[in-house]
Amino acid sequence: MWSLAWWWMLLALPIPLLLRYKLSPDPLDQDAALRVPVPGEFVGLYGGAASAKAKQLRLILLSIIWCLAVLSAARPQFVGETLSLPVSGRDLLMAVDLSGSMEEQDFQLGGRFVDRLTATKSVADDFIERRIGDRIGLILFGREAYLQTPLTFDRATVQILLSESAIGLAGKETAIGDAIGLAIRTLEDAGVDAGRRVLVLLTDGANTAGAVDPLKAAELAARRNMVIYTIGIGATALTVRGIFGVRQINPSADLDEQTLTSIAELTGGRYFRARDTEELAEIYTVLDELEPAESDETGFRPVTEYFHWPLIFAVFLAAALAAFVIAEALPRRISAKVIDHAG
């Protein structure tokens, strides 16, 4: 339906009429009348029916311009049908490890080996894209833990900030406990209800920095009804060439799976192991199946603004009126100069 957002602006419509009848016109000085011997020669220039019609046309155009300007100020809108918007999603934080060990190139993506962070970005980007209706936040941690993105429905911004993250941005070490502590504080500051406190923590190492012990942080998270899903990332075997030939190494030797498993168990979550890109993608598919917290649906009505159309027409008519007045006055000025020179 059509509506006016600022309908009270229509009260300004009678202002020109009120001013016309409230303010008296300037009195005419009868002694200043022009006396000419042949008045008929000046009728076509300064009087007559043509001048009266022009004056009436200008008045009509001015009235239309004023009405259009007032209508534009009232902000005409078209309000569409009510659309339901599900708000039963979760509030979910992602904590991504940016320590130096994430530089290890033991993941394949598109047929080539890439570092762990690049693989994480690729898979997590699809995961975030599917989280329609959820509020997502992003924590980046290394030696320090930082809240990169607070809880938001703007998934595109979270994707961009994750893609712009770089290894070593938060330090070369790993502070898992500090990341969990920051997640607890972030969810509490956001006023998230119990049962909706979810943290997905991804790391490839062990806790080597920070002021908070990971298990103590997990116990605190459990008391705050936070569920933590931990993901250990890194291949178990990698073939490398050295001066003594080809050999296999375990690039994930520093991964503390026992601590990550304990963190998940203490909070009622699960520990996942991602040895390659396919396993990492499967983990995010499982995370997609987390039970969302129930809440009522809300609705909104799309509003389309149309205030610019009457404003455009008002400007167009004002320009046309100005051109008309100039065109009407130009012959009079030329004739007046000719008469002046002839006299």
Image: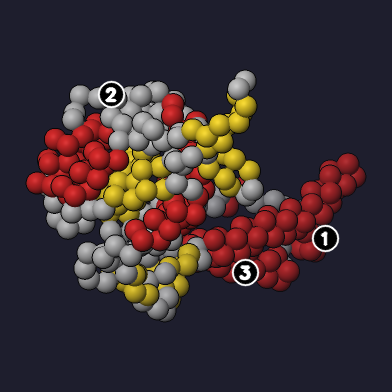
Along the polypeptide, which appears first: circle 1 or circle 3? 1
Residue 220: x %, y % from top left: 12, 40
Rounded to the nearest angstrom, the CA distance separating label 2 from label 3 is 85 Å
On the question of residue 52 being in view, the answer is no
Q: Any mark on residue 41, and which?
A: 1
Question: Is residue 292 or residue 261 the one in the foreground?
Answer: 261
Other residues around mark 2 within 10 Å, as few (<14) / some (14–19) / many (≥20) = some
Q: Any mark on residue 209, and which?
A: 2
Question: Is residue 324 or residue 138 the one in the foreground?
Answer: 138
- In which quadrant of the rendered image does the N terminus lie? bottom left
Q: What element does badge 2 sit on?
A: loop
Residue drawn 18% across the image and 54% down it: 268
Residue drawn 20% across the image and 44% down it: 262
Residue drawn 30% across the image and 46% down it: 230
Q: CB of mark 1 within 8 Å of CB of mark 2?
A: no
Q: Residue furthest top?
A: 243
On the question of residue 294 being in view, the answer is yes
* Residue type marked 2: Ala
Left or right of 188 on screen, residue 274 = right
- In which quadrant of the rendered image does the C terminus lie? top right
Question: Is residue 212 or residue 129 the one in the foreground?
Answer: 212
Between label 1 and label 3, give the one nearer the viewer.
3
Between label 2 and label 3, give the one nearer the viewer.
2
The residue where tag 3 is placed is 56
Q: What element does badge 3 sit on?
A: helix
Residue drawn 56% across the image and 36% down it: 239
